[in-house]
Image (cartoon, grey):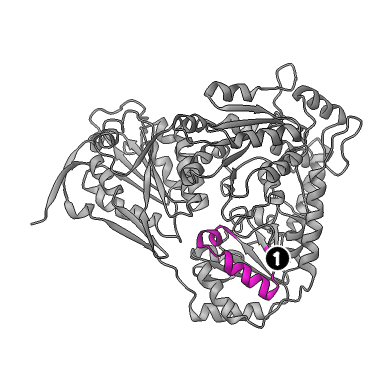
Amino acid sequence: MTKTIRLTTSQALIMFLNQQYLHADGQETPFVEGIFTIFGHGNVLGIGQALEQDPGQLKVFQGKNEQGMAHAAIAYAKQMLRKKIYAVSTSVGPGAANLVPAAGTALANNIPVLLLPADTFATRQPDPVLQQFEQEHSAAITTNDALKPVSRYWDRITRPEQLMSSLLRAFEVMTDPGKAGPATICIAQDVEGEAYDFPISFFDKRVHYLERRGPSERELSEAVAMIQNSKQPVILVGGGAKYSGARKELEHLAKRCNIPLVETQAGKSTIPATFSHNLGGLGITGTLAANKAALEADLIIGVGTRYTDFATSSKTAFDFENASFLNINVNRMQTYKLDAFQVVADAKETLAALLGELATYESAYGSKIKTWKQEWLQERERLKHISFYREGFDPEIKNHFSQDVLNEYADALGTELPQTTALLAINETIDDDSIIICSAGSLPGDLQRLWHANEPNTYHLEYGYSCMGYEISGTLGLKLAHPDREVYSIVGDGSFLMLHSELITAIQYKQKINVLLFDNSGFGCINNLQMDHGSGSYFCEFRTSDNEVMNIDYAKVAEGYGAKAYRANTVEELKAALEDAKVQDTSTVIEMKVLPKTMTDGYESWWNVGVAEESESASVRDAHHVRQAKLATAKRY
């Protein structure tokens, strides 16, 4: 007779989470580190009661915003290279709805996270309950249905015994590198407290194995032939290369065969910036060196990449008439991108196998790689010393604002600090093993081009979804992943205003994070986009109804929360603040007022965005004609 234990659905859930382990490369560790929660009706009396009774080894954190705490959990899993996760518990209705942008973030980036939103009553007898909407065509629809398209796995629990099969399927998805993503299990609030006689064996220690799949003989032989038949191959390093831990294999292959490496945002910090064959970021936010190499390449070897429009410059970064594609990815769907030859295998295993077959191969680049890299380093040095002149801005920086408007910003914000100058000063000042995080605005472009990351996995960009508000929430996740290191949120004022609630959580739990706030009083990146395409500056600047530039005292806001705050509007003030922040034991915020239009731009890339086909403005019509000409050169699939 099967031995059972009588538990509520929520108690069974918590007991199960405590018994999940991941085995990867000979190491076995608990897979679920803890749980973030904001209690409300629907989860406080179910999951809340279970955690209060016995959380086991799970660490429990009280979040301040459901999206924010989910982003912290996502950043933690991403930083741990998907080998450990946090779960996230919310109430019904708006609490669950706040998970949607976070789930989209996890799905776009292939990051495992367990989302546990409460649901309405399974019995439907009290319906409609508080925070429940009604649809005439179905009584079964709740807020949680909005999570279906942004979840890799989704289920609704309306009976206690359903939990068992649902959890097994969720963990199968989250521990599979080929399809990792958010698993959402919605539990009806009455069912959370219902008891059931669960088999004791369901709570035995369960080990999920992360196996490395090598290339088949057919895949390997064709990949070797493609490389040997190419003259100028380029390797595109994606996030999958980082998760696979393929750093040494990439370095050895690049150096032995004289192949340049170019990076996506997710792949950056897999390879040191100082490595001789690393030409930096590719595409719209890429370096001139990487973009030159990509356009000349006759073979693109994509390693763990999704080929997003930013990486491919909207499918104009390569010479599609003369270039072939070889894709290495654990996800079969991704290998089919750009009509490539598909190698469905682990990056590290595949690259190691290629190394064994390409002992005599050398590309025809000669000294080109070294020349391209040196040219870009000189450009990076120039950007470090951009200056502001009231009588005329540095002509090397593209500027849509008139000199009078720039002077207005300088006066209103009390600064003459360019964004690129500040960013490079930060790169020089913080410790090499520190970890930075960013997600949205113009800063990701500057970071991919300019930031030198030489320690593994110290560059954390969420650019799959580019979700504003991820930056500060995610920094808390970084700190939980690396409590012994300094972690820095690089965030614009627009994203700060979107969401910074988990700064308070970090202060509450004494998890020191550092927020580097770039304030140019507006949505600067999108302002560039509209003005680049012929429009004026329209509703992207932060101005009062009297048309005055807003100067918000973010440092005072941070001080009110209990953070150590700094105001730094010169390079000297910034470096001093960074050094002082290192010795603090509480979270810090360094507010920098930076001039708009002082970010990097271009470098032979193009972004396909919608432009008005008809307009009273000649500049908008001109922008549309430019787009049509570029579309004629873009690949169609």
Position of residue 116 in the picture relative to residue 107 (left or right): left
Residue 108: x and y, percent? 52, 50
Asked whether 152 or 252 is in front, the reply is: 252
Q: Is residue 239 magenta?
A: yes
* Figure check: 546 above or below 108: above
Position of residue 61 in the picture relative to residue 320 (left or right): left
* Residue beneath the point at 52% across and 41% down: 474
Q: Quadrant of residue 235?
A: bottom right
* Residue beneath the point at 50% across and 42% down: 479
- The region drawn magenta spans 238-261
Q: Is residue 30 visible?
A: yes
* Residue beneath the point at 76% across and 76% down: 364
Asked whether 120 or 330 is in front, the reply is: 330
Q: Which residue is mark 1?
A: 277
Q: Is residue 247 magenta?
A: yes
Question: What's the magenta bit mostly, secondary-structure-wise?
Answer: helix
